[in-house]
Amino acid sequence: MLRILRDVDQDTGVIFLETHRLNGQLHRDPVEGPAHVRRNEGSVYERYYWKGRLHREDGPARIVLDEETGIRISELYYRHGLYHRNPTEGPAIIFRDPENGTVLTEVYKLFNETYRDPAVGPCHIERERSGKVTEELFSTAEEVLAMRRRLSRRATTLKLMAPSP
């Protein structure tokens, strides 16, 4: 059974909480929008769920937006409940300075594990508000080999778990 809950501020008429549930689990087709939206103290929190798991294939599954500046303070990419984004598309975890939009943190994740081919670049990057890089971490050769082995096994699993239309 599909259930949509909306909590509205009686003074302003603004919806400050909206959830979509299917059979008790947070769930909504990502094309239609997030399954969970909350407004609180100038920020909008959006979460995309598929059958109770954070999941979105064409964008971040968790977003925090500063309503005043329009800056996405954080973007977190998930597939089937795991941090996941193809490193060629960008980092799976992004945190920005809420005032100037500078990317402060980037973390590359595959199947919930921090990973990026070191020949391409670091798997974890930290910056100051000015944009100056303060720390870079790289995947080790052992991590690269282990990830390549796991990728072949997990790709098959993800195909089996893919949402049906």
Image (cartoon, rainbow, N blue to C red):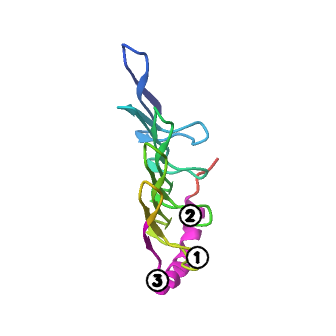
Q: Position of residue 22 (x, y in %)?
A: 47, 38
Q: Which residue is tagged 3?
A: 140
| Residue shown at 59% from the left, 53% from the top | 57
Residue type at the position of mark 2: Leu
SS majority, magenta: helix
Question: What residue appears at the point 44 percent right and 47 percent down from the top-left corner?
Answer: 52
Along the polypeptide, which appears first: circle 1 or circle 2? 1
Q: SS at mark 3?
A: loop
Q: Residue furthest right?
A: 165
Could you tell me if residue 50 is visible in this image? no
As shown in the figure, which amino acid type bears the numbered disc 3?
Thr
Residue on which the image places disc 2: 158
* SS type, badge 1: helix
Going from N to C along the chain, the mark reached first, 3 or 2, is 3
C-alpha separation, residue under disc 3 versus residue under disc 1? 19 Å
Q: Are marks 3 and 1 in contact (CB under 8 Å)?
A: no
Residue 57 in magenta stretch: no
Real-space CA distance between mark 1 and mark 2, rounded to the nearest whole angstrom: 10 Å
The answer to whether residue 148 is magenta is yes
Residue at the disc numbered 1: 152
Q: Is residue 120 left or right of residue 83?
A: right
Q: Of 86 and 156, which appears nearest the observer?
A: 86
Most foreground residue, 157 or 38: 38
- Badge nearest the viewer, 3 or 1: 3
Q: Is residue 68 above or below residue 49?
A: above
Q: CA distance from mark 3 to mark 2?
A: 25 Å
Image: magenta residue range: 134-161
